[in-house]
Image (cartoon, helix red, strand yellow):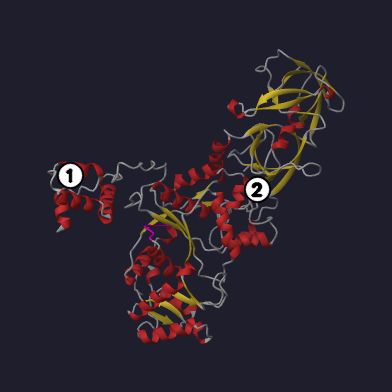
Amino acid sequence: ADLALFSVLGFPSQAAELRAVLAKLPPHATAAQRWISMMAAHPALQEATQLCLGVTKNQEAIFDDTKAVMDPLVPGMNALEGGVAGRVVTRFPPEPSGYLHIGHAKAALLNDFYARRYQGRLILRFDDTNPSKEKEEYQESIVVDLQKLDIKPDLVTYTSDYLETILGHAKYLMQEGLAYMDDTPQEQMKTERENRQDSKHRNQSPEDALKYFDLMCSGSEEGANFCLRAKIDMKSNNGTMRDPVLYRQNLTPHHRSGTKYKAYPTYDLACPIVDSIEGVTHALRTTEYDDRNEQYQWVLKALGLRRPRNCNFSRVNFEYTVLSKRKLTWFVEKGYVTGWDDPRFPTVRGVVRRGIDIAALRSFMYAQGASKNVVNMVWHTFWANNKKEIDGKAKRFMAIDKARNTKLVVTNGPKEGDFAFRETTLHPKDPAMGTRVIRLCDTVLLENVDVEGIVVGEDIVLLRWGVVKITKINADGGLEGEHVPDGDFRAAKRKLSWIADVKNNCPVVLQEFDHLVTKAKFEEGDNFEDHITPTTMATTEVVGDAGLVTLKEHDIIQLERRGFYRVDKPYMGGDKPLMLIMVPDGRSKTMGGLEGKLAHH
């Protein structure tokens, strides 16, 4: 009756509609005002309003226009179906069995985006119900990696904290005849499911099911042969509905609860239960779980639990990249990389160390966020997006190859003992970033490749200093020239980076990296070990200007005409040079013709 009357009033759930209806009531109709306001604020009616608007007009409802409105949707992201500001709860549920990679980063960022946009909550839940794979080390690393991504969950929980509750729900399913215990050998069970053939235990009594369940949970050898299976539909076209496994014995000590439990629920049982208990409204999952959505909802309906909405998005795949934990572990164990934070790795800590800007990573992931099409992304696109973010804030410096350089004597230049300097901006397009000083001297170092074919009488530009006319080419390849104070910058074809040949320059080691594998996309049956890139790291020693000694770890700079670099280790003096990692910029070649030793990606 309440719903029928509210619909007659026009279903005034939104703020503007509610005010219009209330304004028509006489002042003494306070009871009616309270009832209408109560109905308009009902969560189910607000969700229904949002669903209707989303279907008919692709709009978002405004239920309280006195509060700050939600941020606009960023390109690539869709509104959440039935999402209401202040009531959205998302979760990021990683298994602590490895380090987060770029695919996990997308899931974490999308969940964080929706929780923040809808002024809701983000739960970080460790899905720790497989002690054979899980370690405290991985759990701690996930927390650190989320911090690197600027993700701050509102609540941290553990699936293992709900094991008693899940145990009770499992027993309820058996009592209701909705689950049974099965000791069919694994391969035979797989064949039966493929052939849609019932297990011999499918019509087992609840009493027998509970007896064998207790046997399995006791940790006994006899109980090890049993697993708990849901009794759903062995004839279903959806393979995940053909009586999936819900519980298995596992005697490996748990990293949090030790040996208290001898059997653990599968993800298919634990995830929907804990989602419901924790108040999750929207369960975001990759499209790999499309078929499992029906199973997820069956579990909740069978247990009589509140049902969150399933929202699916495409997983991230990259060309020339493997994301499987098993394969990444192989690279670590075989010594192809230095560890899980190696810049060649697609882990979160790997790409952060390589020089990804978190704002760029977010925009890149958001751009494909709502798409359900699984595609192999190109790293060039990823890094080109990153360049847009770092270009405007990367300070500019210069450096010259230590082994492959040519000396130019500027005959009218200042002597080293004169300690002459020139002030220039740290960023040519942003004077507000400040200035740096460049040491001037009558002997400067140029890149060998830059002076190939140079002739006497040619004007060159020494960037940030001025025009120099070449007056002599020595037998050893060295050059002499004369600084021309009023020289024509535009007329000179060669505009070169350089370094004064003085004692206080900064020693620098540049590191560049290539893909670990040579194949863009692996097909089923391919062995990735047959496609390992022979050389994936190269180093170059360069002489940098003195301003580089002020840099700190994680700073991202540009070495003019070379490219962008992230500070891996700051200059520590003596034999501890500044260590820089090249940050790809999406180009196939460097910006100024100074090529590195490996492919530029």
Q: CA distance from mark 2 to mark 1?
A: 67 Å
Label 1 residue SS: helix
Callout 2 amino acid: Asp
Kindly report which numbered mark, 2 or 1, lies closer to the viewer in this rendering: 1
Check disc 2 and report the residue beneath it. Answer: 514
**Residue 351 counted in the magenta span:** no
Question: Would you call the spot at circle 1 few (<14 residues within 10 Å), some (14-19), or many (20 or more)?
Answer: some
Residue 22's tag is 1
Q: Please state if 294 lies on the left or on the right of 428 as rendered.
A: left
Residue 570's tag is none
Question: Would you call the spot at circle 2 few (<14 residues within 10 Å), some (14-19), or many (20 or more)?
Answer: many
Callout 1 amino acid: Leu
Label 2 residue SS: loop
Q: Quadrant of the C terminus?
A: top right
Residue 598 against residue 250 in the figure, above or below: above
Please report whichever mark, 2 or 1, sits nearer to the chain's N-terminal start: 1
Q: Please state if 133 lies on the left or on the right of 268 as rendered.
A: right
The residue at 55%/71% (across/down) is 131
Q: Quadrant of the N terminus?
A: bottom left
**Residue 285 counted in the magenta span:** yes
Residue extent of the magenta highlight? 279-286
The residue at 81%/42% (across/down) is 574
